[in-house]
Amino acid sequence: MERISKTGKGIKSDETLFALIETLRELDGAGVTELADRLDVAKSTVHGHLTSMREHGFVVKRGREYHLGLAFFDYGQYVRGQMGIFRSGMQAVDELEKATGEMAWLITHENGKAMYIYGRGGQNDIDINTILGTWAYMHCNSGGKAILAHLPDEEIHQIVDEHGLPARTENTITTREALFEELEQIREQGYALNRSEDLKGVHAIGIPLMFEGEIQGALSIAGPAHRLSQERCEGEVLDQLRAATDEIELNLAYR
Amino acid sequence: MERISKTGKGIKSDETLFALIETLRELDGAGVTELADRLDVAKSTVHGHLTSMREHGFVVKRGREYHLGLAFFDYGQYVRGQMGIFRSGMQAVDELEKATGEMAWLITHENGKAMYIYGRGGQNDIDINTILGTWAYMHCNSGGKAILAHLPDEEIHQIVDEHGLPARTENTITTREALFEELEQIREQGYALNRSEDLKGVHAIGIPLMFEGEIQGALSIAGPAHRLSQERCEGEVLDQLRAATDEIELNLAYR
DNA sequence: ATCTTCATTCGACAACATCGAACGCACGAA
DNA sequence: TTCGTGCGTTCGATGTTGTCGAATGAAGAT
């Protein structure tokens, strides 16, 4: 397994540790031997790292298998709770879901990818928790595009360099030219649409959340194409999104 | 700062890494110099670890400060999603909240502490998300006691050795004798009560969740003492909890 | 502009992460 | 029951590499 850092600047032993964490996730838990084989390191090395992690709750031993521990959930909740956008935006998401009956999401970005940090299900039969905390490409996501549109051009190029513009459906934007054109339009109109660019049959509209001139994240409404037409998005839903945005940006200011 | 592992078995460099993570949380983000001073290591050492973490999304740099990254939230959601009790119990918690109008919680334990892994607010004005993912003592928590009651005696002693029985209110159980008496009663009656043992004015009732003879966690209902009397707990609420438990244990079996 | 205060880089050295072999424990087969 | 296999764990030797401190850059502040 390849486990060297890209730049070579970091600490090698940490790299092994993170590879262990990653592998434990991929395998949904594993034993020392299996991990050592997979990462091509000595069993004793694996055992040492696991012992350290165990003392800090990042790993638990169940029988002879090691699993990632609840410390991750603890830290995860902390990290989310620290985000101003989360604290100021939760209530708005709740209200939006009620008003529209569709899925409402709060989205941020880190390292060129978008993440769903809070959401409500609407009248859809989807389990919010399977989406919460997962990474998404920014170029085929309404919230992601709304964020991208407010990043400096240089950063956008970096992101495309790193993650590419993979086609998720036939509607996905796959060229830089098309992307920059779209982002220009998004800046002009103040919102981003997603017409089945990520998942077939799913439409969405996203609106940027700014604070002190910086993009903080985005708010989005998503739903089945038949119910969430472009007309509805750009009409009633957009109005509700704009109201919610104002509320959030006000919250961000007065705290 | 003390940073050596208790047993001395683990890896020292990992210990530094975890100390960094912990400190970044305590300080809500910090710079290299501040971290190096606090942990009493060279700046270059801190910088090396931060670089490694950054490459894996566990840390982000905002200006000159480093902050814990969303990778924690990602992993945290994964860890919770892996728990059978979570997947099988969410719906029951939703239903319980609706039926009782009180807070409903799903609780697990790891390393002698209880953690809230899913909850609903009831008609209370409390923000669920500030409690979600936090650790709690088991001896002064209805769910915690329900779990403790089904652990082997030896393990209970270990837990008390490690975490003690700190008094949170005047009602908290603070001696081993009283604790074991209480646990015996809990085993007999099949549920655990919390009469302001953790927070003044807050009552709760917890019920163990078993699967394949092993304790998996607990379900609990909590609310203000004036509304959640002992009579109500042991009457209507207990019935609803028992029904929910059956549902969850059935879900755990057929998946 | 100058000074200060950071983050970052670099080379040298000894600490310690890594390895592999040996141990001991648990489980299943005979 | 006994043996054998497969696993997690321990241990000492080795040289890789984590750590240090000084030097360098890059920003802010005065």
Image (cartoon, coloured by chain):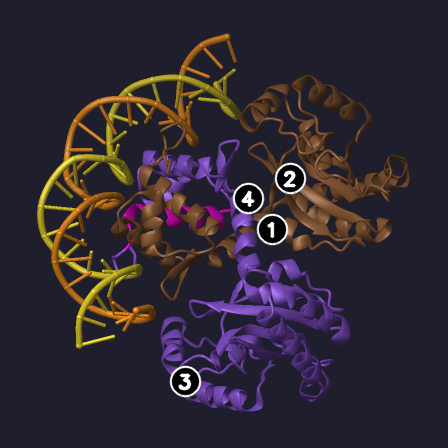
Chain colours: A purple, B brown, C yellow, D orange
For the residues beneath circles 2 and 3, the answer to whether they share a chain is no
Residue A75 on image: x %, y %: 52, 50
First in residue order: circle 1 vs circle 2: 1
Q: Quadrant of residue B127?
A: bottom right
Residue segment shown in magenta: A10-28
* Marking on residue B108: 2
| Chain of the residue where label 1 is placed in the rendered structure | B
Q: Are marks 2 and 3 in contact (CB under 8 Å)?
A: no
State the SS at label 4. loop
State the SS at label 1. helix
| Chain of the residue where label 2 is placed in the rendered structure | B
Q: Are marks 4 and 3 in contact (CB under 8 Å)?
A: no
Single out the mark in the foreground, 4 or 3. Answer: 4
Single out the mark in the foreground, 2 or 3. Answer: 2
Q: Quadrant of residue D6?
A: top left
Q: Name the one closer to the observer, B106 or A28.
A: B106
Residue of label 1 = B81
Residue of label 4 = A70
Residue of label 3 = A176
Q: Amino acid at mark 2?
A: Thr
Q: Answer few, some or many: residues within 10 Å of disc 2's Cα (few below 14, many 20 plus, some between 14 and 19).
A: many
State the SS at label 2. strand
Q: Name the one closer to the observer, B7 or A127.
A: B7
Does B114 appear in magenta? no
Q: CA distance from mark 4 to mark 3?
A: 41 Å
